[in-house]
Image: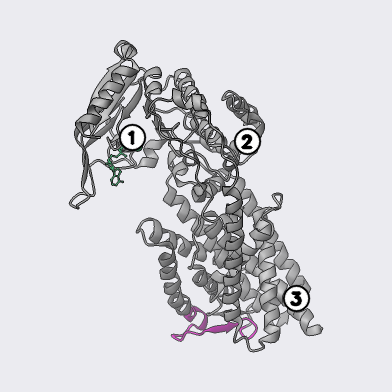
């Protein structure tokens, strides 16, 4: 029971931290239809930058999180630039940045060791680094950790909701929906894609810095699986609340992240060494996509049999040389319907 | 005034699919003209609009706006002074946003899209009145997502959006073709009303001969990248459907279809 309870508490902590990664993926995937693989790289990047700022610059832990945001957003913008300016596909742009970051994050650890040697782990406690959740070797009470995390997540959620209601935020949403409209409004579509990916990866970098502070350890491999985890969280969250119009997508994404993180954490009760955790992550994600596609198909079927507007023959005769009536196709359904409706 | 000067345009140059749409094509749109463009499929009407709007670059030639060379100016920049409505009703609006939100975006065209509130409550009445003037009962649906509206309703809102801010020209590419005849008529009349009220310059491609003759003050027929009929004002008024239809048929016979 106690083990189960502890697993629940740590699951909630992880879920709240991952909710911020999922916010990023919501922007990249749901809004911009860009399954952003650079996430796996910008997560540890935020972690290492945040840790360096804490350890070497002695900044406040919140400033360290902001540092993670800035670092993530720079590389998010790079992913966007590769795609927009150099016409590299979405997936490949993400892979390029992610791969580059494997080396970059490792190289940055030399700023922690202050030697030529890199490390794959760097403990906050062993090095006396003070994060949000520890003062020296004293760890914060786990419930207080949850409260702090929740406060951060809620602040970010509110900021995002406000942003989506601003002119710039609405343009970002419109970019994913109809690029032609953005051009018609006199704005550069590419700019909004780069902006969106920049914000998305900023959030991921922020979460990476937070994760390091929360686990009191910088782990160079902490990014692995974050794309899948974030995508799963977004899809679950949005699917659960697809019928509830009053629930904001940001709220839905938080719930999705909590559910997914808890489920994976409970799995570690069975899989004690964590050997199968990534496999579980992959299988669960595949199942989510499969189920989601089935639900979507069902929905489209329903749409197809809806009656068409009757047309009046007399009117048609009036229309000399007019084109045959083009029925509306279901093309209007956004590509990422599963994530939006 | 918009001038297309000595425009040449080929698609898929140097391949078996090479198509020459224009060679040494010249076309001038005077301020205040409302031009209907008709012509057979593939005659270059859409390409004409695309080159004007900057969606595609001509291989050779220039595009001038009020005497200024805008040939290579990016599409999104010249869009600030252009209005455009497409055949596909979903292209002119953001379908995952409400009418109110769409109109708010369009109203801000040409200005900064910063961090201030996207939708201003103060403007609600103004927008609702605009929408009510269409006469499709949309005034009660200000907070309904565009995606939930019919093609005709979306196309009408697209028209409002394209003409909300001052523009040098309105480009319409078969914007009524995807609608049922009754709705097409409503949208066509709305188009005419807006163009007249705002004194707009417009270039409208249509396959509907009746619209082409009834509306606008200049008619242009295109065939294989050439203008084969161009009448304006009084001369245009004298034209009847049969004249145009005969010309159309003659061409069709000439090219054997
Ligand atoms: N992007 C493109 N790539 C290749 N060929 C093209 C492209 N756009 C147009 N064409 C070709 O150029 C010619 C003119 O096309 P355009 O779309 O301008 O005709 P249109 O007059 O608008 O015809 P419609 O009445 O069918 O809309 C056609 O032969 C067409 O196949
Ligand atoms: Mg065309």
Furthest-right residue in this view:
A1
Q: Subunit of mark 2?
A: B
| Residue A85 included in the magenta stretch of the image | no
Disc 3 secondary structure class:
helix
Q: Chain of mark 3?
A: A
Q: Are marks 1 and 2 in contact (CB under 8 Å)?
A: no
Q: Chain of mark 1?
A: B
**Badge 1 element:** helix
A280 to the left or right of A38: right
3D distance between C-alphas at marks 1 and 3: 61 Å
For residue B65, above or below residue B9? above
Beta carbon at label 3 within 8 Å of ligand 1:
no
Q: Nearer the viewer, residue B242 or A228?
A: B242
Residue B123: x and y in percent read 62, 30
Q: Which residue is mark 3?
A: A9
The quadrant of the rendering that contains the N terminus of chain B is: top left
Task: Tell if the residue under mark 1 belongs to the same chain as the one under mark 2.
Answer: yes
- The disc placed on residue B120 is 2
Mark 1, Cα crowd under 10 Å, few <14 / some 14-19 / many 20+, is some
Q: Which residues make up the magenta segment?
A: A109-127
- Determine if residue A273 is in view: yes
Circle on res. B49: 1
């Amino acid at each position: 029971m106690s083990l189960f309870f502890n697993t629940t508490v740590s699951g909630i902590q992880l879920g709240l931290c991952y909710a911020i990664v999922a916010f990023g993926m919501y922007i990249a995937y749901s809004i911009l239809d860009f399954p952003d693989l650079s996430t796996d790289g910008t997560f540890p990047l935020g972690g290492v930058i945040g840790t360096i700022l804490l350890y070497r610059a002695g900044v406040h832990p919140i400033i360290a999180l902001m540092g993670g945001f800035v670092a993530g957003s720079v590389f998010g913008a790079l992913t966007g630039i590769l795609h927009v300016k150099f016409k590299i596909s979405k997936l490949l742009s993400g892979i390029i940045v992610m791969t580059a970051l494997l080396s970059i994050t490792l190289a940055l650890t030399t700023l922690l060791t202050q030697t030529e040697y890199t490390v794959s782990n760097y403990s906050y406690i062993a090095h006396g680094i003070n994060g949000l959740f520890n003062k020296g070797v004293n760890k914060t009470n786990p419930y207080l950790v949850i409260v702090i995390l929740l406060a951060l997540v809620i602040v970010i959620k509110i900021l995002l909701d406000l942003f989506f209601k601003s002119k710039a935020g609405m343009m970002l949403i419109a970019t994913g929906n109809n690029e032609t409209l953005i051009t018609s409004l006199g704005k550069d579509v590419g700019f909004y894609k780069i902006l969106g990916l920049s914000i998305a990866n900023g959030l991921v970098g922020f979460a990476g810095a937070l994760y390091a502070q929360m686990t009191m350890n910088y782990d160079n491999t902490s990014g692995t699986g974050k794309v899948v985890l974030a995508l799963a969280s977004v899809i679950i969250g949005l699917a659960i609340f697809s019928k509830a119009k009053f629930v904001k997508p940001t709220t839905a994404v938080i719930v999705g992240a909590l559910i997914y993180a808890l489920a994976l954490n409970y799995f570690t009760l069975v899989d004690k060494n964590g050997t199968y955790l990534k496999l579980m992550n992959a299988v669960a994600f595949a199942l989510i996509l499969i189920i989601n596609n089935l639900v979507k198909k069902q929905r489209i079927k329903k749409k197809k049999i809806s009656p068409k507007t009757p047309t009046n023959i007399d009117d048609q005769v009036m229309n000399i040389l007019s084109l045959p009536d083009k029925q509306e196709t279901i093309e209007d359904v956004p590509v990422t319907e599963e994530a939006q409706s | 005034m918009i001038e297309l000067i000595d425009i040449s345009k080929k698609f898929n140059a140097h391949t078996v699919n090479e198509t020459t749409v224009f060679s040494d094509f010249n076309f001038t749109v005077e301020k205040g003209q409302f031009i209907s463009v008709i012509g057979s499929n593939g005659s270059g009407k859409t390409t004409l609009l695309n080159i004007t709007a900057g969606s595609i670059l001509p291989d050779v030639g220039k595009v001038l706006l009020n005497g200024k060379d805008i040939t290579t100016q990016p599409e999104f920049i010249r869009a600030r002074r252009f209005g455009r409505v497409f055949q596909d009703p979903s292209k002119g609006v953001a379908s995952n946003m409400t009418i109110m939100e769409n109109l708010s975006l369009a109203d801000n065209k040409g200005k900064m899209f910063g961090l201030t509130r996207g939708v201003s409550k103060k403007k609600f009445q103004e927008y609702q009145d605009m929408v009510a003037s269409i006469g499709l009962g949309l005034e009660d649906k200000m907070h309904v997502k565009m995606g939930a509206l019919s093609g005709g309703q979306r196309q009408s809102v697209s028209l409002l959006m394209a003409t909300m801010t001052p523009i040098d020209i309105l480009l319409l590419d078969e914007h009524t073709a995807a609608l049922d005849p009754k709705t097409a008529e409503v949208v066509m009349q709305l188009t005419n009303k807006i163009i007249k009220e705002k004194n707009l310059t417009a270039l409208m491609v249509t396959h509907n001969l009746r619209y082409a003759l009834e509306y606008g003050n200049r008619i242009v027929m295109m065939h294989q990248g050439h203008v084969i009929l161009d009448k304006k004002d009084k001369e245009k008024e004298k034209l009847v459907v049969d004249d145009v239809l005969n010309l159309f048929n003659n061409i069709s016979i000439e090219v054997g279809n």
